[in-house]
Image (cartoon, rainbow, N blue to C red):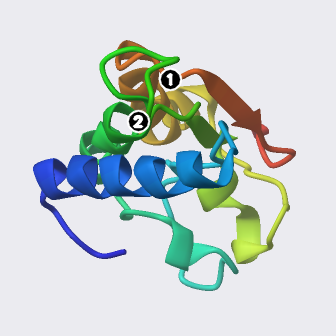
């Protein structure tokens, strides 16, 4: 999904939630809030961008999926993934190591997850990629 329209992403989340709840499922493994820093990373298609501000602004998907209140008739639990550093793995390896300073890890890869938490995301999917050099 390539867009910089946060309102559109929220509307897409609402539409997805309506479709999911029609199946009886109440949990969605989205949004992917990874900051894709290496084009060789095998999951760049899941990322909203390569700078922290883009995935952070697209955390509106959380609001779209969960609605104003979890438990509503078309509300599904969102899962912010893959915490933390998955898009910055060394060499672009899928499920690899992210080797950078803690300050860079926090500055680059943490903001989208902070934005999701501020939106009340119901769950966070961890990654095995986080690490510091």
Residue under label 2, please give it.
Answer: 62
Instruction: Indicate whether 63 appears above or below 43.
Output: above
Residue found 40% across the figure and 31% down from its top: 111
Residue 132 appears in the figure: no
For disc 1, the marked residue is 121
Using a 10 Å C-alpha cutoff, classify the residue at mark 1 as few (fewer than 14 neighbours), some (14 to 19) or many (20 or more): many
Q: Is residue 97 left or right of residue 66?
A: right
Q: Nearer the viewer, residue 45 or 123?
A: 123
Pick the residue in front: 74 or 14: 74
Quadrant placement of the N terminus: bottom left
Q: Residues within 10 Å of mark 2 (few under 14, many from 20)?
A: many
Count of residue discs: 2
Q: From the viewer's side, name the closer residue of 46 and 76.
A: 76
- Spatial CA distance of label 2 from label 1 is 6 Å
**Residue 70: mark:** none
Quadrant of residue 124 within the rendered picture: top right
Residue 48 on image: x %, y %: 38, 63
Q: Earlier in the sequence, mark 2 or mark 1?
A: 2
The answer to whether residue 12 is visible is yes
Quarter of the figure that contains the C terminus:
top right
Contact? badges 2 and 1 (CB < 8 Å): yes
Residue 9: x %, y % from top left: 25, 55
Q: Secondary structure at mark 1?
A: loop
The percent position of residue 46, horizontal first and vertical second, equals: 54, 69
Question: How far across and how far down the image is residue 41, in percent?
Answer: 66, 77
Q: Residue at x 52, y 17 (%)?
A: 71
Residue occupying the point 22% across, 52% down: 11
Q: Nearer the viewer, residue 2 or 106?
A: 2
- Tell me the quarter of the picture where residue 51 sits: bottom left
Question: Vertical placement of 24 versus 96: above or below?
Answer: above
Please tell me whether mark 2 sits on a helix, a strand or a loop. Answer: helix
């Amino acid at each position: 999904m390539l867009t910089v329209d946060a309102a559109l992403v929220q509307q897409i989340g609402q539409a997805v939630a309506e479709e999911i709840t029609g199946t009886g499922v109440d949990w969605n493994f989205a949004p992917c809030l990874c900051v894709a820093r290496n084009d060789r990373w095998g999951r760049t298609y899941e990322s909203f961008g390569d700078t922290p501000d883009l995935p952070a602004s697209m955390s509106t998907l959380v609001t779209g999926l969960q609605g104003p209140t979890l438990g509503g008739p078309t509300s599904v639990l969102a899962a912010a993934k893959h915490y933390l550093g998955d898009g910055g793995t060394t060499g672009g390896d899928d499920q690899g190591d992210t080797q950078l300073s803690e300050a860079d890890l926090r500055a680059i890869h943490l903001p989208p997850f902070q934005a999701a938490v501020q939106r009340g995301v119901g769950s966070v999917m961890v990654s095995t990629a986080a690490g510091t050099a």
